[in-house]
Image: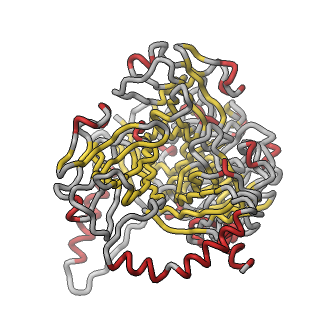
């Protein structure tokens, strides 16, 4: 019998209500397990799992990242040294939380949140009820009651035969959670199988945090004059709830202030209790907005406007909810409380002084940094700490640093440049990706090593990054044996350990086929331009060399910011000229002066960096008489002749493999 009593005292009750697990334990138990299971692919790809209690200003109960449970700096102090998770939680998907030595104050709703780079991937709600353990003198009473219960079974059966309805109140707690503005109404459910007298009174009341009359059904009809003012016109029950055995209450236009514990009581005409049900309603505001700006913007507005009449003594609190719940801005009594602000935001935030009166709770964040990217939550509290309104703003601060690299097919390698500040943190992850294609990893560097096994197969064995790249800040990527299909958009992103973006650069790579242009000049012209325009901003250490490809004579060389005229061939000395600052402007064209007939031929311009060829172009220069056929005309005639040849049954087809463009110098 002693074991039976112990069982009666220590039983853990678990039931499922509206998608929320409810667990009941007694104060003094050694521990309780709050369950949370997600698919392995969700947990393994996440950056963190957080257990929260939203009703606290510091809501974090426990946080775990891929490296372990050691990030508990922002844990609510009441849970210090009392929580733990399995070491392989994120690898197995079992994110259950063990809470040791539960107390009555631990009772409430816990949320298991899986996040990836600050974005919520899944949420699981668990409600914990912790009751005081009955005193030991009740043990004997339980024994007696157990015996009496056995003796009274026959009496109970008789009571039900005669449909005696009176019994203890139903204390089941049902949690209903909605989002403010998401639904026009919410149903507080209460269905029964009991046969109730038609003259019974049904009364819905708000019993916590205040006592308010919500809805009364009496004498066969609703009694709106007995309602509290804030619920008038917002509640509705079935026309005949007692006959239909459906006592559910519909609450229209739910508000955050409707959050609380609702008790429905059914009583007979003489006032005795027949039935009772408790429904805990939580109205959470799920407003969310995404704001994206570039780093060079001087400021950004995190928007939050409301039409509700807010109390002037309310507190407005902006927090970074993805990063240690840092306080970004505190606003109370029409002034900013800078003393409670996190140091990294001091002097950088601003709100309208009339924010509560005009309903504009937006926050201006100045002097933007990449590390400002994250999830910001604005919460409006009443004087007693109850939440009035809430909004989430996801801020993305991007560095759209953009560079274009263009090379000719056939070069041995090409470098995608990215130089940044030196001494990056040792635990950052550097990732190069093809962002014009879906999910193509080019190369990743993490934990002092390159992770080739995660590369897309098209890039395996063809990529390199420099040693000690975190120390030097040179995150450039070398792509060996570039192909035409490698043309695309490449993004290099530097991630912090928690997934936040530190730095980012975009490089557009273009691999071109061999380019040839034909320039014709009429005899007697004094000069001609051999054109070559490419992307501006070439590296300062490249060499630009114009050569006669048919005679291998050097025509003009530009290196180290100057023209090297001593390397010119004899026929070209004093006859060539390039624009000033050709590397900066990208105009590598060559002007050839004092033209001679022997200057006609094939010219090749090569841009090289050491042994690597970055760009290349060919120009064919031809002369014609003032009244003679031009090269273009001759070439078109040749094509017509070729076409007529292909019309015959035994014709020979001549393939053109080099794209030609023709330009006449006038």
Name the residue rendered at 19%, 78% in the picture: 647
Front one among 235 and 61: 235
Front one among 271 and 184: 271
User: In screen coordinates, is 280 left or right of 541?
Assistant: left
Q: Is residue 588 visible?
A: no
Image quarter for residue 663?
top left
Image quarter for residue 5?
bottom right
Q: Looking at the image, is 194 positioned above or below residue 478?
A: below
Say which quadrant the N terminus sits in. Answer: bottom right
Say which quadrant the C terminus sits in. Answer: top left
Give the mark count: 0
Name the residue rendered at 48%, 42% in the picture: 208
Its colouring scheme is secondary structure
Front one among 559 and 176: 176
Name the residue rendered at 50%, 51% in the picture: 618
Q: Position of residue 183 (x, y in %)?
A: 31, 48
User: In screen coordinates, is 289 left or right of 652?
Assistant: right
Q: Residue furthest bottom?
A: 650
Q: Looking at the image, is 255 positioned above or below residue 459?
A: above
Q: Is residue 468 visible?
A: yes
User: In screen coordinates, is 18 left or right of 457?
Assistant: left
Q: Looking at the image, is 573 positioned above or below residue 252?
A: above
Name the residue rendered at 69%, 30% in the picture: 562
Q: Position of residue 491 (x, y in %)?
A: 57, 50
Q: Position of residue 646 (x, y in %)?
A: 24, 77
Q: Position of residue 359 (x, y in %)?
A: 39, 22
């Amino acid at each position: 019998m002693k074991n039976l009593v112990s069982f009666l005292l220590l039983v853990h009750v678990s039931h499922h209500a509206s998608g929320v697990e409810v667990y009941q334990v007694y104060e003094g138990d050694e521990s309780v397990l709050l369950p949370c299971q997600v698919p392995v692919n969700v947990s393994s790809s996440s950056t963190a799992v957080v257990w929260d209690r939203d009703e606290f200003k510091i809501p974090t109960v426990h946080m775990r990242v891929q490296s372990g449970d050691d990030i508990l700096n922002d844990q609510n102090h009441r849970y210090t040294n009392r929580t733990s998770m399995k070491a392989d939680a994120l690898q197995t998907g079992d994110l259950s939380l063990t809470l040791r030595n539960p107390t009555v104050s631990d009772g409430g709703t816990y949320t298991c949140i899986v996040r990836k780079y600050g974005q919520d991937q899944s949420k699981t709600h668990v409600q914990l009820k912790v009751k005081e353990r009955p005193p030991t003198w009740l043990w004997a009473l339980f024994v007696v009651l157990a015996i009496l219960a056995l003796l009274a079974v026959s009496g109970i059966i008789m009571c039900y035969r005669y449909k005696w309805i009176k019994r203890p109140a139903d204390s089941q707690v049902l949690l209903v959670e909605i989002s403010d503005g998401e639904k026009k109404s919410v149903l507080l459910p209460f269905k029964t199988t009991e046969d109730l007298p038609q003259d019974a009174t049904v009364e819905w009341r708000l019993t916590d945090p205040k006592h308010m009359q919500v809805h009364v059904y009496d004498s066969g009809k609703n009694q709106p004059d007995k309602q509290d003012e804030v619920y008038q016109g917002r509640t509705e029950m079935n026309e005949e709830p007692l006959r239909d055995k459906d006592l559910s209450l519909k609450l229209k236009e739910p508000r955050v202030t409707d959050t609380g514990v609702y008790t429905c009581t059914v009583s007979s005409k003489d006032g005795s209790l027949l039935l009772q049900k408790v429904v805990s309603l939580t109205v959470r505001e799920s407003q969310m907005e995404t704001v994206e700006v570039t780093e060079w913007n001087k400021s950004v507005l995190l928007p939050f406007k409301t039409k509700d009449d807010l109390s002037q003594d309310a507190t407005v609190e902006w927090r970074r909810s993805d990063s240690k719940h840092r306080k970004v801005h505190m606003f109370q009594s029409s002034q900013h409380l800078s003393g409670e602000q996190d140091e990294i935001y001091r002097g950088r935030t601003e709100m309208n002084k009339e924010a509560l009166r005009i309903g504009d709770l937006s926050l201006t964040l100045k002097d933007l940094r990449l590390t400002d990217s994250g999830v910001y939550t604005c919460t409006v509290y009443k004087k007693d700490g109850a939440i009035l309104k809430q909004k989430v703003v996801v801020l993305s601060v991007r560095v759209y640093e953009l560079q274009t690299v263009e090379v000719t097919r056939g070069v041995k390698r090409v470098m995608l440049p990215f130089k940044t500040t030196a001494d990056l943190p040792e635990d950052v992850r550097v990732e190069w990706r093809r962002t014009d294609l879906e999910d193509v990893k080019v190369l990743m560097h993490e934990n002092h090593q390159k992770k080739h096994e995660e590369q897309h197969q098209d890039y395996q064995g063809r990529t390199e990054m420099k040693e000690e790249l975190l120390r030097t800040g040179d995150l450039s990527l070398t792509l060996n044996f570039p192909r035409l299909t490698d043309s695309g958009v490449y993004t290099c992103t530097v991630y912090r350990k928690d997934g936040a973006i530190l730095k980012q650069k975009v490089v557009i790579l273009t691999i071109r086929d061999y380019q040839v242009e034909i320039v014709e000049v009429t005899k007697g012209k004094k000069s001609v331009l051999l054109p070559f325009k490419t992307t501006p901003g070439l590296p300062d250490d490249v060499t630009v060399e114009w050569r006669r490809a048919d005679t291998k004579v050097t025509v003009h060389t530009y290196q180290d910011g100057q023209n090297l005229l001593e390397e010119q061939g004899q026929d070209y000395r004093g006859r060539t000229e390039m624009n000033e600052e050709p590397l900066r402007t990208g105009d590598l064209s060559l002007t050839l002066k004092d033209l001679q007939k022997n200057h006609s031929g094939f010219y090749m311009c090569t841009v090289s960096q050491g042994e690597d060829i970055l760009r290349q172009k060919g120009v064919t220069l031809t002369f014609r008489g003032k009244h003679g056929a031009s090269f273009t005309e001759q070439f078109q005639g040749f094509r017509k002749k070729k076409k007529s040849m292909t019309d015959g049954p035994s014709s020979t087809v001549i393939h053109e493999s080099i794209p030609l463009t023709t330009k006449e110098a006038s």
